Amino acid sequence: MTDDGGTGNGQPGSGQPDDGQPDDGGPDAPSYEGLATFCGLPWVTDPAELARRRPRVAVVGAPYDIATTHRPGARFGPRALRADAYHPGTYHLDLGVEIFDWLDVVDAGDAHCPHGQPERSHRNIRAKVFEIARHGIMPLVIGGDHSITWPAASAVAEAVGWGELGLLHFDAHADTADIIDGNLASHGTPMRRLIESGAVRGRNFVQVGLRGYWPPPDVFAWMREQEMTWHPMDEIWDRGSRAVIADAIARALDGCDALYLSVDIDVLDPGFAPGTGTPEPGGMNPADLLRAVRRIALEVPLVGADIVEVAPAYDHADVTVNNAHRVAMEIFAALAHRARADAGGPPPGAGPLPA
Ligand SMILES: [Mn+2]
């Protein structure tokens, strides 16, 4: 160990005295060190400990992918997000906030998803998410294919008020089919199940980024009957994402005071997110998606979220993993900024840039 008078956190050259003990990098340790928890956050899986600690957010893995219609592999998404994402630091430059000074976040581990057993897997996801949400902790679920949004958002609705939940949904696909190849619990059907069950309000269900060749017109007719709103990629191309996101937020919040955010990583163009099951060319870019998520988390009463469809086997250079990880970081940063504003700091949207 050396001491050459530099700055840092117990690293060689940090200026700390050489007392013969090894340095402990703690939360600032590099992402390739130690146990692979999400962001290196504390691993708290015991429900009693979660209830006692009551973090603002608990990350939950949903390693389930047998509801995919095309290429599988999203069961490996949670582990890839924990193990392979690069941790850049914890200070959000645009909001000027040291995230974890203002926000307690833990990694609550995975819901058990035994292979070939969709009912049992979905039941476990719903139970684990409910156990978190019922204590007023925001679950951030990392998938897994998009079918997991059915049990996850149902659990949040059960906790905050059945039928009182709105949903903001980023995706290339509407995922509102009734049934696909005989499967009611496909990754192409969860949004219909949520509305049919009454868990989520159709009129506060807003979709962003739809494009491509699916679903067919009869599904859009059903969506219209439910008073759903959707902003296709073509509209984003035409009007720009800032105007579209402002409209999406206004609609989702109209008469609704609890919102769930669901981000299918395939809302990004496959050039930015090749590691996914059903890539659709012509999607959003990360600069727009990350700012959209930040703005939503700054402005809406967020009570739950998920990031789904990361299938690392098709990824290149961790680009999909890192983009999905940064969606979570934007949520964390925005919630930290709000917590600081509540404590008398700068209001949301007025964060200083670093000196
Ligand atoms: Mn999708």
Image (cartoon, rainbow, N blue to C red):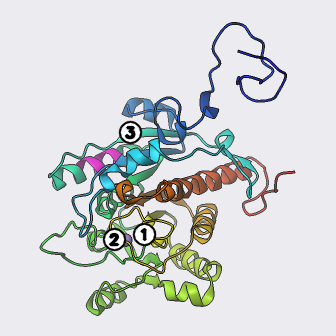
Mark 2 CB within 8 Å of ligand 1: yes
Tag 1 near tag 2, CB within 8 Å: yes
Judge whether residue 271 is colored magenta. Answer: no
The reply, left or right, for residue 220 in relation to residue 267 is: left
Q: Which residues are magenta?
A: 123-130
Which corner quadrant of the image does residue 203 belong to?
A: bottom left
Q: Residue furthest top?
A: 20
Q: Which residue, given by chain and number where applicable, does mark 2 sit on? A: 278
Q: Which residue, given by chain and number where applicable, does mark 1 sit on? A: 266
**N-term-proximal mark, 1 vs 2:** 1
Query: Which amino acid, by three-letter code, is at mark 3?
Result: Gly
Query: Which amino acid, by three-letter code, is at mark 1?
Result: Asp
Can you see residue 165? no
**N-term-proximal mark, 3 vs 2:** 3
Q: Nearer the viewer, residue 280 or 124?
A: 280
The quadrant of the rendered image in which ligand 1 is seen is bottom left
Per the model, the C-alpha gap separating discs 1 and 3 is: 24 Å
Q: Where 98 sits versus 231, above or below?
A: above
Q: Which residue, given by chain and number where applicable, does mark 3 sit on? A: 109
- Nearest to the eye among marks 1 and 3: give it: 1
Q: Where 313 sits versus 203, above or below?
A: above
The reply, left or right, for residue 1 in relation to residue 217 is: right
Tag 1 near tag 3, CB within 8 Å: no
Q: Where 203 sits versus 276, above or below?
A: below
Q: Residue at coordinates 62% horizontally, 83% vertically from top-left?
A: 240
Q: Residue at coordinates 49% horizontally, 63% vertically from top-left?
A: 258
Q: Main secondary structure of the magenta part?
A: helix
The reply, left or right, for residue 256 in relation to residue 347 is: left
**N-term-proximal mark, 1 vs 3:** 3
